[in-house]
Amino acid sequence: MKRRMKHLLGYAAIAALAACGTAQAQTTVKIGVLSDMSSLYSDIGGPGSVAAAKLAIADFTVQNKDIKVELISADHQNKADVGSSVANQWYDVDKVDMIIDTPNSGVALAVSQIAATKNKIFIVSGAAASDLTGPKCNANTIHWTYDTWMLANGTGSALVKTGGDSWFFLTSDYAFGHALERDTMAAVEKAGGKVLGKVRHPINSNDFSSFLLQAQASKAKVIGLANAGGDTINSIKQGAEFGIVKGGQKFAGLLVFASDVNALGLATAQGLTLTETWYWDANDANRAFTKRWQVERPGKFPTMVQAGVYSGVLHYLKAVAELKSGADGKAVVAKMKATPTDDPLFGKGEIRADGRKIHDAYLFEVKAPSESKYPGDFYKLRATIPAAEAFRPLKEGGCPLVSG
Amino acid sequence: MTSVAQPVDKAALANGERSIAVAFVILLAALLVAPLFIYPLFLMKALCFALFACAFNLLIGYVGLLSFGHALFFGWASYISAHAAKVWGLPPELAILAGMATGAGLGLVVGVLAIRRQGIYFAMITLALAQMMYLVAVQAKFTGGEDGIQAVPRGRLFGVLDLTHDMTMYFVVVAIFLGAFLLIYRIVHSPFGEVLKAIRENEPRAISLGYKTDRYKLVAFILSATLAGLAGGLKAIVLQIASLTDVNWPMSGEVVLMTLVGGLGTIFGPVLGAFTIIAMQNYLATFGQWVTVIQGAIFVMFVLLFRRGVIGELAHWLRIRL
Amino acid sequence: MFELLNISPQALFGQLLIGLINGSFYALLSLGLAVIFGMLNIINFSHGAQYMMGAFAAFLLLELTGLNYWAALIIAPIIVGATGVIIERLFLQWLYKLDHLYGLLLTFGLALIIEGLFRNYFGSAGLPYRVPDELTGGHNLGFMFLPNYRAWVIVASLTVCFATWFVIERTRLGAYLRAATENPTLVRAFGINVPRMITLTYGFGVALAAFAGVMAAPIYNVSPQMGSELIIVVFAVVVIGGMGSIMGAIVTGFGLGIVEGLTKYFFPEASNTVIFVIMALVLLVRPAGLFGRAR
């Protein structure tokens, strides 16, 4: 109920702002934040993404009074069919022009195809599947914040370069885990490292002791966690029990977010290495955004996914304002690709022909409790991966939109 | 042994046929007019689940067996139909038939394992077997794991009718639903159906009368699984996606909820229950966090207070059969 | 022999020991279910949610009152057991005269409510809870490194399981309980307060689940979903063991933990389905379960 009231107040505020500019012709667009509001990824995207979108709309319409933006949101519950149903209904019935977020690759793939069929727009901030800019790319979808290739490459090669040159993989036994393992293995070997072994565990396993024992026995310098969510958290937690980190091995989280680190606590997660494209405490602009964001989400810290929603909405609105219409999905996306991006959070970047947004990536290491000075002080920066190297090269993706 | 469904009400029997016919006409009229007011994709989804719930109700309402793993048939049929349409390129009618065959085959295997037991044991066994097949679905390559099978083509029905138009698809779905619905009605009101009801009321007595009750129960189980497979296959073609949600145990719980809310052992109950629950999930998508809690609360409320379900209470109050 | 089969004895013994530890959780949880089913004929679907509540109670006791793990081991089961008593009085008692399936449906609904509420309030990511200082670290046994906490888990569960079995099968109170299940009217005629015994039994079963939850908190992720992921496996354990048999639940719990451990070594991808496969096989041969009596 509270959120409904906030939405209504949001509408009222935006309508009031828009009313100031009624003298000029009004362009109206409707944005839908489709995210996981209630389960596994609700802290990674969820209500925080809605808050980020609101901030972006507010920031944009303050200076551009001739555009009116409506915002709605819904919960895809991590289910591809719920996500498709909502997307279909939004595009068909509720006149939504652009959908953003979807932290779940299955949902993202489904919505991407629906957007293409209906010539609307879909900006993926939350999902990881690199196929979205690969074989499954289309002219209506933009993949914003990160993807599996970037994660694998970032963590894989950067760790090898800083000394972690022997690896053992703990992989979730399903398509996503396999893909993560495959991409990271390639990156590790390309950077000169060796893969000493791997073990596959069923998804949503409770107990990792036997797998961790095997990892310990391999004596690899780095244990790559090609899994996500609760599996990653359990692996790390139980790894602490078995003294893995104390024994000198490092954990590399291939898909870990700040909210997971929060769930583990610094005592357990210290030393964990991971790659992200945005961190709230990295610079003043990020800190300023975080402060404004925390008004709606007290006690929490924005993730890179939520920052990506802010950045994506902003760039979208710029394109719509220039075209003076949001109706033709392909045209707006083409405009977004033609215009270089520039926002307070991600800085300067661009969107490639395959729909991939390019920006720098960062290798972080989780601080020890003694090094953390205030709540949210999780990471120390180990390396910066420049944008040109961070993402999969354009020609290697297999995207039909890329000619030659 | 007390049973889960309605006791036989002699006064209602007399009006039975007429009230059901009236209700059927109302349902038909509503289905024909609805797409003018309501988003057809939502209606089609609700109809697929209504069919699923009716298939489930055949088992619980008329045989007295609570299967807590019915998502197994629904979900796997959905996968096979999706795969058939997308990868093998079969036309929609054959894809859906493939789904039905899957339901039948799985129904036979699970039925043979589970039928020997009664009541709670039966429920637990179906639950555990369904969970095992869920885990298989997670790891099997062809199911697409977490992504599911997406972009399933609607195709051309019998090579003629282009199903990509929502309205055409809608009327096809209505036709299939009504056909299956009438089939269930015929099964229930047939000599076979009477034996099933006798087994529900008092199995030892049915055995003493010479009926091989295990065989009857198995046939009913397979029928229920086949129709659940029909629902799953249809759903895959309509919504063009087959995913892990369809095989997971919360889905089994949902179909129980739909039937409970509508009315166990009533013909129309599952239809109303399915529409109610799907509508609720749709409406509450904005408040997604509360859907589980509300579903749980509805379960508790109906089990404690409205055991007959909405249609059941209505029928009881009007002293008719529904 | 080990060399012939190309097995490393160290790795194997290590997995067996770990299997035993996991088996302790299965045994504790299925014990609670077996007690409730054996005595009340109710399938407690909310068992997983109550296990989760135990873990959360431990977390909250630490957060809000600073009470540590050892205090939580006693207090959390009492608190959660009390909620169990309330559930029994408010909801379950009306269902005893009806078909047992309604009890299943009711507890299923309760599980949804409990899990949903916790998820809304605490989020899904999980909360930190650490191994108590007295139990950190471990010993190198030669064939594996055994964390002290895991050793404690085995000891504690064996103790609790044995104590419960002893009370139910060998004491007078247990005899009253067992008699009350078979013939409540007669037992009541002897002046024993049957409804109160039933209520307390349910509370005790729930407390067992919560106890397992507190034990799980330091090593498994404390999240609202932690119960629902586990509960179906525990149901399979109870079905294999025989649904009303206390000893069956304990033995099968430990046994299946070991089987799962072995599978993780030989064929890790199948380690989560092996229990269901065994269940299907057992049912074909002995429909009442290994230790069950046909009801």
Image (spheres, coloured by chain):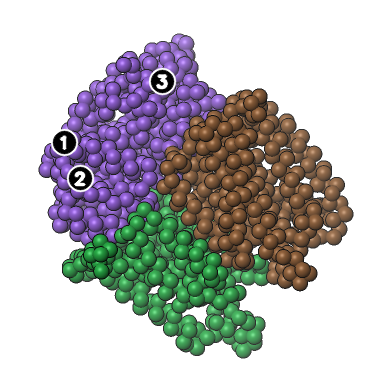
**Chain B colour as displayed:** brown
Label 2 CA crowd tier, 10 Å (few <14, some 14–19, many 20+): some
Cα gap from disc 3 to disc 2, whole angstroms? 38 Å
* Residue A354: image tag: none
Q: Secondary structure at mark 1?
A: loop
Query: Quadrant of the rendered structure where residue C26 is?
Result: bottom left
On screen, residue B93 versus residue C127, left or right, reads right
Q: Earlier in the sequence, mark 1 or mark 3?
A: 3
Residue identified by numbered label 1: A191
| Type of amino acid at the residue the image marks with label 2 | Val
* Residue A195: image tag: 2
Query: Does residue C84 lie above or below B231 as drawn?
Result: below
Residue identified by numbered label 3: A139
Residue at x 40% of width, y 67% of height: C256
On screen, residue A376 versus residue B38, left or right, reads left
| Type of amino acid at the residue the image marks with label 3 | Ala
The chain letter of the purple chain reads A
The verdict on a common chain for dots 3 and 2 is yes
**Total numbered labels placed on residues in the image:** 3
Query: Does residue B184 lie above or below A276 as drawn?
Result: below
Query: Quadrant of the rendered structure where residue A379 is?
Result: top left
**Chain C colour as displayed:** green
Q: Secondary structure at mark 3?
A: loop
Residue at x 50% of width, y 64% of height: C281
Chain under callout 2 = A
